[in-house]
Image (cartoon, rainbow, N blue to C red):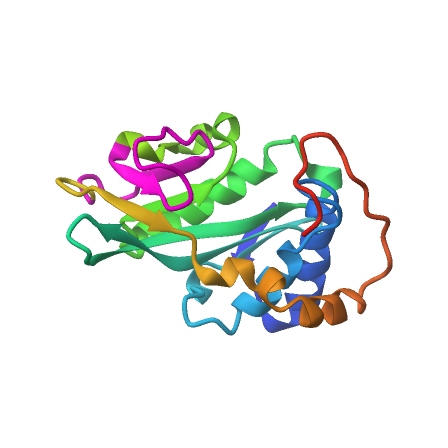
Amino acid sequence: MNIRLEKPEDYREVENLTREAFWNVYAPGCVEHYVLNQYRSNPDFIPELDFVMEEDGKIIGHVMFSKAEIIKEDGSALQAWTFGPISIHPDYKRKGYGLKLLNYALEKAREMGVGIICMEGNLEFYKHAGFVVASSLGIHYHAEPKDAEVPYFLAQELIPGYLNGIEGTYHTPKGYYVAFENKDAFEAYEATFPQKEKEQHEGQLREQ
């Protein structure tokens, strides 16, 4: 197993990997590969935290990080960070690769001085990487009532004490909505990949 920075020559392979990893998981089809494609030219993208994982010379995993914000109670902004999509090829899921990739990336983020990571995800998985429900740290999710304990909104202080005395609201970076804000561009991009059948499963969001 090898983890390294993504290179431009990896881009298409990684986008296809991301598409395979997310297809029909959260919604019929997926948009995560387009989010990644567009984020590489976004000023919030952090190329120093853009990693691929290889096994036997094949790229089987990928994770990217980006800048975000927590709006404090006084209206000022606190620098925050997020990550995702994080992708593991379907053939390698549930074998510990995702956690290894994430822990590696989080350690690199810590070394860079990243103070707080906020993200939306499944606590049962991400607790193994040190994440907790963000409301327990005084950070609220923009799309839910301030007093709600949002089980899918998670956070981790990479610098202990980074949030001391701070309460605020996290806003998902706009870059994550690019496929819904530019549907024609997304559909044109999606058409460059092999056709796959979209399926509606119980518990998914409906296709946007």
Q: Does residue 57 show up?
A: no
Tell me which secondary structure the magenta stretch mostly adopts: loop
- Residue 5 appears left or right of 88: left
| Residue placed most toward the observer, 18 or 180 | 180
Q: Does residue 24 show up?
A: yes
- Furthest toward the left, the residue is 165
User: Residue 130 in the image: x percent, y percent?
Assistant: 38, 32
Indicate whether 152 appears above or below 142.
above
For the point 17% across and 40% down, which residue is it?
161
Indicate whether 76 appears above or below 153.
below
- Residue 173 appears left or right of 24: left
- Magenta segment: does it hold 47? no
User: Residue 112 in the image: x percent, y percent?
Assistant: 31, 57
- Furthest toward the top, the residue is 124
User: Residue 171 in the image: x percent, y percent?
Assistant: 38, 52
For the point 24% across and 36% down, which residue is it?
138
How many circles with numbers are drawn on the protein? 0
Indicate whether 93 appears above or below 53.
above
For the point 68% across and 46% down, which residue is it?
22
- Residue 125 appears left or right of 135: right
- Magenta segment: does it hold 139? yes
User: Residue 180 in the image: x percent, y percent?
Assistant: 61, 60
- Which image quadrant for residue 164? top left
The span picked out in magenta is: 137-162
Q: Name the quarter where the N terminus is drawn.
A: top right
